[in-house]
Image (spheres, rainbow, N blue to C red):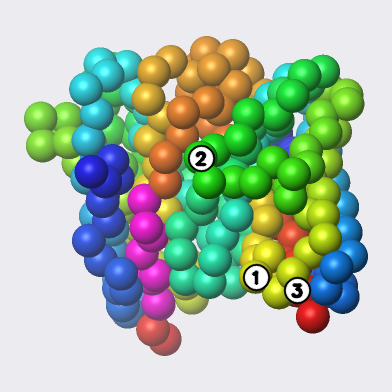
Amino acid sequence: GAVVSQHPSWVICKSGTSVKIECRSLDFQATTMFWYRQFPKQSLMLMATSNEGSKATYEQGVEKDKFLINHASLTLSTLTVTSAHPEDSSFYICSASPREGSTGELFFGEGSRLTVL
Amino acid sequence: AQKITQTQPGMFVQEKEAVTLDCTYDTSDPSYGLFWYKQPSSGEMIFLIYQGSYDQQNATEGRYSLNFQKARKSANLVISASQLGDSAMYFCAMREGPGNYGQNFVFGPGTRLSVLP
């Protein structure tokens, strides 16, 4: 299957700082990537759709100024959590799909666990 | 209304036995895809199996098979010969419409499977 890589896997930061998470498609070009957030023992919640060369599309209730998304190339999307606070602590995971049509399955990065002190 | 329902928050199975994880879905779109993902404690999301709405036969991938009952809108995952490494969260997911770069995915709440030695 396709390979999506996410970095860092773990990050601990102080309240008020910003944290950047990178998501790369290693063996395919991804015009669209997806950022999910997952709280403990819960399902994945779509935060935003990252579009290469254009603005991200945010889901209702997700603050676009808090969660900055940049998709500058066909293989890289970044999520920056700005002025992080303890309530932003969560598991963030990105995904992408390599093909139009066909099954369209999502392939996921390893995820990034953010802890804000 | 929930589009994906997984009624079993937790399941136990004895090693080497088979287990069925339930999933029902709700959509009015005639073209859709159904997916199962495994999420071990490390957090990564692993794609297991896919079933298209127009597929006539149930999907199989090694020890995984999908019991697709279209009229009942169910897509249960069957794991045969359970192994200790199968202990994880399992998410049923649906993509509405044709597969276009992973758009329009929705995930169920998940079922935690524990395989007992």
Disc 3: which residue:
A115
Find residue A87 and name its label: 1
Does the stretch in magenta take in B111? yes
* For marks 2 and 1 on the same chain, the one whose residue lies earlier in the sequence: 2
Q: Position of residue B114 (x, y in %)?
A: 40, 77
Q: Which subunit holds the residue at mark 3?
A: A
Q: Which subunit holds the residue at mark 2?
A: A
Indicate the amino acid at tag 1.
Glu
Q: What residue lies at 42% left-to-right and 40% top-to-bottom? A: B106
Prevailing SS of the magenta stretch: strand
Does the stretch in magenta take in A82? no
Disc 2: which residue:
A60
Q: Position of residue B54 (x, y in %)?
A: 28, 17
Camera sees residue A5: no
> Horizontal placement of A72 versus A85: left or right?
right
Camera sees residue A15: yes
Q: What residue lies at 32% left-to-right and 73% top-to-bottom? A: B10
Which tag is nearer the camera, tag 1 or tag 3? 1
Q: Quick one: which residue is furthest to the left in this view?
A: B71
What is the magenta range?
B108-115
Q: Quick one: which residue is furthest to the bottom in this view?
A: B117
* For marks 2 and 3 on the same chain, the one whose residue lies earlier in the sequence: 2
